[in-house]
Amino acid sequence: MELWYTEEHSKDVRFSIRVDKQLYSGNSEYQKIDVMTSNEFGTFLTLDSLMMLTEKDEFIYHDMIVHVPMATNPKIKKVLVIGGGDGGTVRELTRYDTIEHIDLVEIDKLVVEVCKEFLPQTACKLEDPRVTIHYKDGLRYVRAIENEYDLIIVDSTDPFGPGEGLFTKEFYGNCFKALKEDGILVNQHESPYYENYANSLRRAHERIVEFFPITRVYQAHIPTYPSGYWMFGFASKVYDPVKDLNAEAWNQLGIKTKYYNTNLHKGCFALPNYVKDLLENKNE
Amino acid sequence: MELWYTEEHSKDVRFSIRVDKQLYSGNSEYQKIDVMTSNEFGTFLTLDSLMMLTEKDEFIYHDMIVHVPMATNPKIKKVLVIGGGDGGTVRELTRYDTIEHIDLVEIDKLVVEVCKEFLPQTACKLEDPRVTIHYKDGLRYVRAIENEYDLIIVDSTDPFGPGEGLFTKEFYGNCFKALKEDGILVNQHESPYYENYANSLRRAHERIVEFFPITRVYQAHIPTYPSGYWMFGFASKVYDPVKDLNAEAWNQLGIKTKYYNTNLHKGCFALPNYVKDLLENKNE
């Protein structure tokens, strides 16, 4: 027997993974949750049939969403993670002794439970004493917060289904308000290659630019995401992620990473022309 | 009816493209040649059922294999291209008025003929008066050459089938000899992600390092290649591609590109740790 997981990266492009076994399949109040194992990628998680993470390459995403802001401002103490119920972002954050508190706001409790059972590689630090999990809607959660966080990480699904509200103007405005005066917002920012994803990226960027004086976009190669080419948004009230990088300070921490390093930190902000044009709306 | 082109990126991973029409299918003395059209990628060429290029994203590969060495040494006058029968590399080279002569050594005449008919987007400059096409084996061609080229670009297929000889120690040694004393060798360098490709990358790098005093590897995101993450090798007798980049001089040329720019030139040499470890043989 052959069992294949197939995802449509566009209506004309499919990416398929040979599956050893489906470990879990269930529906929460919000979405369909599946966990499968594969020879090539190890265990992987999909939500509403879209790839969220694989054991083989989740290090790329989690390195880039955490270490880029942390190396820009090593004084970050209080962090809000929105989404990210798999725990990978929290795991990387807990490697910094200087972080005092992490609020994880995940709408879907079942995602956390499933990841704790089947993906201990990412969920392993959710019990860290510095972590508080709130099973709430991130959009609503940030409405009530003011001047509280040094860093907000939006580790969301795509902008359809439960993740939709996390790509709105209202949400980004509330994130700005919830951040301290030197706060940083980092978000998963979709991809510039296939049209659907590129439109999401452009819209998210346009909205963030309205609130933050400093906005930059950076890239990583994530082979199991559509086109393998993924973006992150960096928005800040005062820090420039390239000029303010303190490479020496970060390297002295001795955090061992498989993807991130401080040279790549500088390099990942150098975008191809077609992506720059997309962000500046020149392609439309 | 649905018609899909499917490529195995590893034995457990498949990438599929919805095909509108198969425009050409034939066998040369060396390989199977196919041309298809698709809604997502336009016309695309496969050799022995492996993706060579698509109209949608060939600009990435050809920008990176040509403009990185040309911006490092703008005085390049005589160029040897090995492989590259589709003409994309030659097209980008002909945009430099300063280049006086280009030898294209392609083993398979049928590839050139098929590309001239079905892929004018890449083959459009093969008739440039500065270009001489030699239908020869690249491995043999370079044996006889000494101290002649400013730049050699190895625009080969993967290291199995007709491309195999272009990944050998003998070949790289002969390229060194065929280059002038400030010559540069650039080669398509496979990918670090799936095991088969990663092994090819590591072996090629080990061999090139034996001959050239300066060797660097740089990256690009090419969505239709396995994992979407592709590498190029830069080897040189004197030039360091980052330190010796003359960004101002290149930008003054006014060459409009969709991928390459001089910031990205510097950024693309900043590799993730797992790739650096692979190149330094630390993963084995």
Image (cartoon, coloured by chain):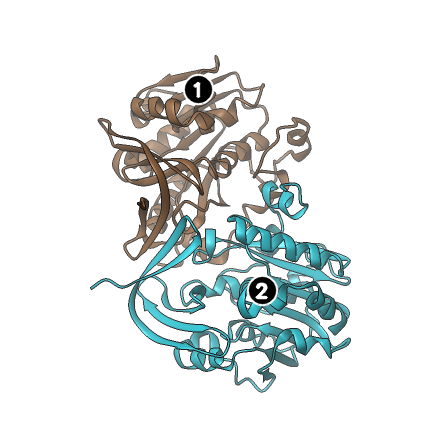
Chain colours: A cyan, B brown
Closer-to-camera residue (B211/A202)? A202
Percent of width and height locating residue A178: 74, 73
Circle 1 sits in a helix, a strand or a loop, which is it?
loop
Percent of width and height locating residue A99: 65, 77
Closer-to-camera residue (B250/A184)? A184
Q: Residue furthest right?
A: A181
Percent of width and height locating residue A121: 43, 74
Q: Pointers 1 and 2 in contact (CB under 8 A)? A: no
Q: Quadrant of the C terminus of chain A?
A: top right
Residue A51 visible, this orientation: yes
Residue B213 visible, this orientation: no
Label 2 sits on what residue type? Ile
Horizontal side of residue A168 vs A159, given as left or right: right
Q: Quadrant of residue B171?
A: top left
Residue at 33 percent across and 69 percent down: it is A37
**Count of picture labels:** 2
Percent of width and height locating residue B280: 42, 53
Closer-to-camera residue (A15/B131)? A15
Decide: is A95 above or below A15.
Answer: below
Decide: is A205 above or below A147.
Answer: above
Q: Which residue is mark 1?
A: B126
Disc 2: host chain? A
Q: Quadrant of residue A264?
A: bottom right
Label 1 sits on what residue type? Leu
Q: Which residue is mark 2?
A: A65
Crowd around label 2: few <14 · some 14–19 · many ≥20 (10 Å): many
Decide: is B58 above or below A254.
Answer: above
